[in-house]
Structure formats: C-alpha cells, structure tokens
Amino acid sequence: MLLERIEALKAQIAELQANNEEALEALRIKYLSKKGEVTALFNEFRNVPAEQKREFGQRLNELKTLATEKINALRDSCKAGESKAAKIDITRPAAAEEIGTRHPLTLVRKEIIRIFERLGFTLADGPEVEDDLHVFTSLNFAADHPARDMQDTFFIASDENDVTRNIVLRSHTSSVQSRVMLSSQPPIRIICPGRVYRNEAITARAHCFFHQIEGLYIDKNVSFADLKQVLLYFAKELFGPETKIRLRPSYFPFTEPSAEMDVSCMLCGGKGCSFCKNTGWVEILGCGMVDPNVLDACGIDSKEYTGYAFGVGVERITNLKYMVKDLRMFSENDVRFLREFETAH
Ligand code: DAH
C-alpha cells in the first residue's frame, strides 16, 4: 500500500510544471514542507514492519531526492525564463528600418537619360578598361596629342615598352562612340552613360574619376541645326523652360566644327551674379559635328552620312542643379550629404 503511494507520487512529481516563483513555492509546500505529501509518507514510516523498513527507507529517500531535484530544476528554468522575459519588452515599438536614398549622381544620370530617351535615343555601353584605338586613335587624336600623356590618362602598364601599354582606363565616354560605329551602321542614335578616369590630383574641383553621358546621332543629312535643337530641348527639360543656350566655338579632335555649350545661369536667370562670375552663362557640355575622319576610321561612309556628338559631365550638371560645391562629396559616402537628396525625386 505504502509502496504504491510512493510510486504514484514519483510519477506525479516527474510531471510537475511551474512557470513562475509563486507556482513553484506552492509545489514545494505541497510536497516537501512539514505538512507536505512526501513528508507525510516519512511520518508513516514508523508503522512499517521492521523487516520492510530497509526497502521502504530506500524508496522514500529516492522519492525525496527526486522531489528536491525536480523543484530545484524548475527553479532554475523559472529564473532563466524570467530574465529572458525581462530583456524583451514586447510593448516597445520596433526599431525603424534605415532606408537608403538614391545617390545624387544616379538621380541626375537617370533624369538626363529620360530626356534623351524621349527623343528616341537608346542606351549603349562600353568597357571602362579600354584600348588606345577606341579611346584615341579612331577618334582622330594625333599620335602626340597631350591627352595620351601620363598626366591625363591612366595606363594599365607603367612600363612604356610593355605590350599592354595601349590598354588604358577610358578618359572619356567618347570611346563608346567608336565602338558603336565600328559595330553598326546608321541610323545610329545612342547615349552612353559611364564612368571615366583621369590622372588628376583630387581636389574640390577635380577628381581622378567622374561620370559622363555621351550622345551620338548619325544619319543622312544630320546638321548642326539638329544638334542645336536637341541641346536646347535638353537644357529646357533639365533647368526649366526659361533656359537659354549659347554655343561657343571650341576644339575637339573628333568633331568639326566643335562647340562648348553654355546655359543661362540658373541662379540669376542671365542677369549676372557671383555664381556665373557676372557673365550670365554657365558652361555645361562639349559637342560638335562628327569629324569625317572619325566616320571613315570607324567604317561609316562620310560622303553619305553626317552626325553630331556631345558629351555631358554628370557631376557638372549635379553641381549646377543642387549647388554641390565639392566634388569629393560624391564619393565619400557621408550619409548626412546623401540624405539631403531623399526628397529630390
Ligand atoms: N569627350 C569630351 C571630353 O571628355 C567631351 C565631348 C566633347 C564629347 C565633344 C563629345 C563631343 O562627344 O562632341 O571632354
């Protein structure tokens, strides 16, 4: 009889659960206190016949050990549970996710691309590690042109006698012009956004890498008037419908005639201010009619086709649109600067 009660209690105790200190204390009192069930069995031990005392004694001690260990184990897990609960405050609002913003150069590049896409230009691409043929020779650069010099161009091989000496980091996106012309026939109407490299000391006004967007249009009867009209549309879309443009004669090896384009100052509207150095104009790009030498060098018949080209600096346009004074800001990843463009688009 007593043995059965011991076994029943053992089974009961093995199943005990408590998830807080109070419930645990109640269990301790129920089983192990002076009036507890285990203690009660010890009290009955007196009545056990002497020859059975040894076995019962052993069983009772086992029961007591089991009960004590069980209560201790429950106390440990209770404590662990409570300290975990104390760390997690489920009523606290979740930490806000940090969402990045588009880089200002990305915003401006996309804006420029969208404007030219509306005019029917499609995107073209070329490698940043280029060869001399695409960057210089096919674009009518003379063999001794200063742009090929170490001061301007990054050469992949530093030894002048190295056979890979003609591999460079492209110094302008005009290299994509020659790629497209060499691989396709007119009509060609492309823009090419991309990164370019020049061996310059890094200052607020110059960097060893920056971004350009190249434009090229080749077909029959393309004239300078077409170029001017497209660039006027571009300037108005970019800086507003009041914007005026002017083209100043210039020189590039790959265009003839060549021009640089100014837009009316976006701060003073052309009246003259400190930003435009009182001229009323700010320069934004280079352009011209593709030199017949370039067409012929790239396998396009210059007697049949004419074309225009232009090259825009993305940093330059971004500086003008957002008044960024220091070029280095674009590549420093300072989130205080980047956050300023959160609402730009
Ligand atoms: N490649 C010139 C530069 O890097 C920019 C340029 C000027 C591109 C005139 C053109 C162009 O396509 O016609 O300074």
Image (cartoon, rainbow, N blue to C red):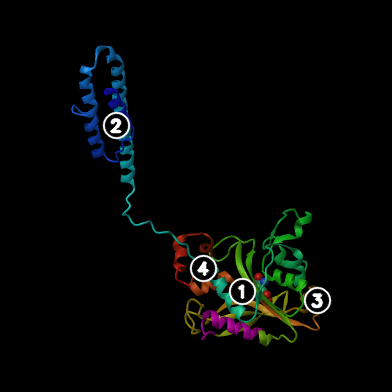
Q: For the residues labelled 3 and 2, say whether their Cβ atoms are less than 8 Å apart.
A: no
Identify the image quadrant of residue 189: bottom right
Q: Which amino acid does the dot numbered 2 rest on? A: Ile
Secondary structure of the residue carrying tag 2 is helix
Note whether 158 is above or below 47 in the view shown: below
Q: Earlier in the sequence, mark 2 or mark 4?
A: 2
Note whether 307 is above or below 143 in the view shown: below
- Magenta range is 227-243
Q: Earlier in the sequence, mark 3 or mark 4?
A: 4
Q: Residue at x 74, y 53 (%)?
A: 159
Q: Residues within 10 Å of mark 1 (few under 14, many from 20)?
A: many
State the CA–CA distance, disc 2 to disc 4.
65 Å
Inspect the magenta stretch and tell me whether residue 239 lies in it.
Answer: yes
**What number is the disc on residue 208?**
none
Q: For the residues labelled 1 and 3, say whether their Cβ atoms are less than 8 Å apart.
A: no
Q: Which residue is mark 3?
A: 296
Q: Earlier in the sequence, mark 2 or mark 1?
A: 2
Quarter of the displayed picture in which ligand 1 can be seen: bottom right
Q: Nearer the viewer, mark 2 or mark 4?
A: 2
Q: Residues within 10 Å of mark 2 (few under 14, many from 20)?
A: many
Note whether 289 is above or below 149 in the view shown: below
Task: Point out the image quarter for the N terminus.
Answer: top left
Q: Earlier in the sequence, mark 3 or mark 2?
A: 2
Q: Which residue is mark 2?
A: 71
Identify the image quadrant of residue 163: bottom right
Q: Which amino acid does the dot numbered 3 rest on? A: Asp
Q: Is residue 98 left or right of residue 140?
A: left
Q: Residue at x 64, y 80 (%)?
A: 120
Q: Which residue is mark 1?
A: 312
Secondary structure of the residue carrying tag 1 is strand
State the CA–CA distance, disc 3 to disc 2.
95 Å
Residue 181 screen position, x and y as percent: 75, 74
